[in-house]
Image: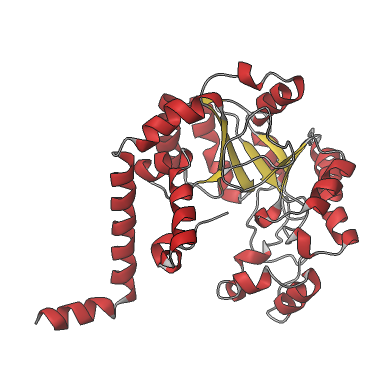
Amino acid sequence: MIVVILGRYLLNPEKIMRGVKIIRKLIFLVLRFTLIPFFIREIIQRKKVTIILYHNIKPNTLDMHFKVLNSKYNIITLKNFLEARISGKVNDLPPKSLIITLDDGYKENYKLKTILKKYNMRPTIFLCGGIVGTKRHFWDGEDCVSNNRDYLKTISNKKRLEFLREFGFEEEKEFGDRVALSNNEIEELKDIVDFQSHSMFHPVLPNCSCERAYNEISQSKKYLEHNYGFEIYALSYPNGNYSDREISMAKKAGYACGITVDVGFNSQNTDIFRLKRMSIADDADINELLVKACGLWWYIRKIFDYTSQLHKLSIFKNEVF
């Protein structure tokens, strides 16, 4: 009987996923109450600047996160850090400084307006100049990408676009619905959000030709400044992919800093075009938030990556960037 029940459970994908989620939650719960996150926060992060990354978080989740982050960290803006970094005064910033960022500029980000006002927060949202204000879609959100994501990030930009074209996707195609913020929504949010650049169409920049990569970086800055009147000083490398070439291009285009998804904290000595960030799942509970914000989860992953094949298990896969 036990074998039969177990067999039915293992053959049910939904039950397996529920089980995986429960295990993940338990892992984060245990990690939080080891007090390791507390000691990292109070000893290591106290003199560092932490940047966290969301994408499409819901208002009620962000409300819960902000309440906790406000009690554990001192929230500052990306511009605060940049000014301190340039003037050599990062050490004068509040202890445990934390910056909140969101990549892509999804239309759902508009629903965060009330929460941002409630906590008087000013996050940085990185926009794709060729997608916001249109009904164009992000290429990596298409159905044909789900099982080919890793492959598509390894081939040339030209081949990636050819693959997507076979499934009816074009970068400049206007679809029936929009996925990004509209012009009106951006206008309403601009007083409480620091909008910055995330390229034009979110390609894998190192896989682009020099001309295409530079246009993605430079034209997004020009477009956002010209059409919305923003001061664009920061570039978030799309997909988290960049190389020395993209850094040189960002400098040439007039950016003051570049944001990665490389794990770690930031200080006066951090390369201004390789600023580090901690990715937070949009549906993270408080335990996961605190474990990831302090960097503990990512360093555990690194240990497993180097010492075993456990990173192939589903509990370590599908982290968002």
Q: Quadrant of residue 174?
A: bottom right
Which of the pair 102/268 is nearer the observer?
268
Residue at the (83%, 41%) spot, across then down: 227
**In the visual, does 30 lie left or right of 238?**
left
Residue 163: quadrant of the picture: bottom right
Image coordinates of residue 228 in percent, x first then y, are 79, 38
Q: Would residue 269 be found to the left or right of residue 304 on screen?
A: right
Q: Is residue 120 visible?
A: no
Picture quadrant where residue 7 is located: bottom left
Q: Is residue 223 above or below residue 131?
A: above
- Count the marks: 0
**Horizontally, is 87 left or right of 1 in the view?**
right
Q: Position of residue 87 (x, y in %)?
A: 75, 19
Res 135 seen here: yes
Identity of the residue furthest to the left in this view: 1
Relative vertical location of residue 204 with respect to residue 92 in this rendering, above or below: below
Q: Tell me what residue is drawn at x 72 percent, y 40 percent.
A: 196
Q: Residue furthest front?
A: 307
Residue 321's place in the image compared with 64, above or below, is below
State the quadrant of the N terminus: bottom left
x%, y% of residue 319?
50, 57
Which quadrant, please, contains the C terminus?
bottom right
- Determine the residue positioned at 60% across, 39% down: 101
Q: Residue at x 85, y 41 (%)?
A: 251
Given residues 80 and 177, the one toward you in this image is: 80
Task: Residue at the far top: name it.
Answer: 92
| Colouring of the image | secondary structure
